[in-house]
Image (tube, rainbow, N blue to C red):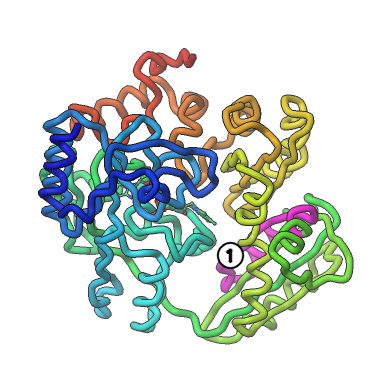
Amino acid sequence: MDDLVRRLAGIVGDRHVLVDPGVAAGYLTDWTGRFAGSSPAVVRPGSVPEVAAVLAACNDAGVAVVPQGGNTGLVGGSVPLGGEVVLSLRRLSVVEPVDRAAWQVTVGAGATLAAVQEAAAAAGLAFGVDLGARDSATIGGMVATNAGGLHLLRYGGMRDQVMGYEAVLADGRVLAHLDGLLKDNTGYDLGRLLCGSEGTLAVVTRVRLRLVPHYRQRVSALLAFATVDEALAAVTSLREELASVEAIELFFGDGMELVCSALNVPSPFGERHEVLVLVECSAQHDPTDELASVAGELPGLADVAVAREPGPRAALWRLREGHPEAINQLGPPHKLDVTLPASRLGEFVESVPAVVRSVAPEARTWLFGHAADGNIHVNVTGVATEDESVDEAVLRHAAALGGSISAEHGVGTAKRPWLHLNRAPEELAVFRAIKAALDPKGILNPNVLLPPAAEVAGTPA
Ligand SMILES: Cc1cc2nc3c(=O)[nH]c(=O)nc-3n(C[C@H](O)[C@H](O)[C@H](O)COP(=O)(O)OP(=O)(O)OC[C@H]3O[C@@H](n4cnc5c(N)ncnc54)[C@H](O)[C@@H]3O)c2cc1C
């Protein structure tokens, strides 16, 4: 291993190879604190040729590599749980000039989401994916996890934004298809294949992204209801009747109280409400009146807070986006990010706390999510990090109702044992064949996504 570390230092320079666990600490533990590992070296290349040389060296030595961007992933996929080398892409952060004619921009894998949003805004455009970790999450990580986020309803997820890609294979060969042509049926779409590959197929180094219109007028409203049924009926009406709708989020009275107390955020309401729907509309004309007219007809609407200016809108959004941070303050949570079919969402929300209690009576369940996508984040606190009985129970429950065990965070390490709930043995065999074709020695993130070979037959341990 010492030889390899010396070779890596020769490629990227001594100061970009971190071997001291104290110095490397931020690269070794995930955002939740639930997953922590160790690594012989954290390597921080500054160019694509350096990425290629690092991978070739690790491949020659048969040493596994975990690609890492902003390390905001929530499924234990970005940290070296098996003692892998960590390959940090953060230095590849160049945002090239926006192509105004094409409504596209090419960016380095290490560019943060916020940097891309700023570049798009400066060109009078916007980027279609947004999420709470925008200041740290990188475009490479967002491609690798196929991030969803707050605006999927209107613009789709990360896969829908990728117009071109550049990536390095495990053996150091560089693939690139960055033309960004809207119509280009010249074979397999390898860029989109990398979306959701979680660092197992190749290391993303550059991405050409689609941009979307920048809507000048914006309004947010927090709508309060007494029951889940009323709130979900409101979500359907808002989607159906508002062309300007950009985001519809769901959270609950206990989560809102936690955010208010943990993060010292004021509530816009004088009393507690059980179910909250946060809706945001944007358009070139002011969408406030059309939102007010649809909201005014919603059955069961108990209270509403409306915000048009950036400051008050941010205060309403803090109530939703503050959930992960406030929950983390209770100790490392088990984060189970699931999607349900629209017709089963209410049933899942109502029943999942009892499912959790059946295996962990002392645990607390916190629910929030992207309501219009059927995506609920089930966060469970008060359970030992290594106790997976809650994960098993919740994921089985979601799958039994026709849902997915991973809506947008990916499978990572956290959900790998349950991938068979959504993917048949035949599909897993094809996944494995693709992995073997691109990474024959299996050095790229070997401990995420795909279950160990012995489990492929559908008989998980
Ligand atoms: C507060 C908060 C809010 C969040 N909200 C959302 C949300 O709304 N929607 C959502 O989808 N996610 C959300 N996330 C999760 C997270 O931000 C996303 O998964 C994001 O895409 C991860 O990006 P990253 O750069 O931090 O990747 P990392 O955490 O560094 O890595 C994630 C995965 O991608 C791989 N990877 C990273 N970079 C590369 C690369 N260049 N090439 C190949 N593989 C790579 C890693 O190996 C790992 O498997 C949230 C996280 C936090 C902390």
Residue at label 1?
247
Could you tell me which residue is drawn at 63 percent across and 81 percent down?
311
Residue 281: tell me if it is visible. yes
Q: Nearer the viewer, residue 19 or 108?
A: 19
Could you tell me which residue is drawn at 59 percent across and 48 percent down?
375
Q: Is residue 18 above or below residue 292?
A: above
- In the shown orientation, is residue 10 left or right of residue 448? left
Could you tell me which residue is drawn at 76 percent across and 74 percent down?
305
- In the shown orientation, is residue 402 left or right of residue 445? right
Could you tell me which residue is drawn at 44 percent across and 55 percent down?
157
Q: Is residue 210 above or below residue 219?
A: above
Q: Position of residue 166 (x, y in %)?
A: 19, 54
> Given the image, on which type of amino acid does mark 1 rest?
Ala
Residue range highlighted in magenta: 233-256
- In the shown orientation, is residue 65 left or right of residue 60? right
Residue 146: tell me if it is visible. no
Q: Nearer the viewer, residue 41 or 456?
A: 41
Q: Is residue 106 above or below residue 395?
A: below
Task: Indicate the quadrant containing the N terminus: top left, top right, bottom left or bottom right.
Answer: top left
**Crowding near the residue tagged with mark 1, few <14, some 14–19, many ≥20 C-alpha atoms within 10 Å:** many
Q: Is residue 79 above or below residue 69?
A: above
The verdict on residue 239 being magenta is: yes
The verdict on residue 12 being magenta is: no
The quadrant in which residue 240 appears is: bottom right
- In the shown orientation, is residue 73 left or right of residue 112? right
| SS state under label 1 | strand
Q: Position of residue 139 (x, y in %)?
A: 35, 59
The quadrant in which residue 260 appears is: bottom right
Q: Position of residue 229 (x, y in %)?
A: 79, 50
Q: Nearer the viewer, residue 108 or 422?
A: 108
Q: Position of residue 279 (x, y in %)?
A: 65, 67
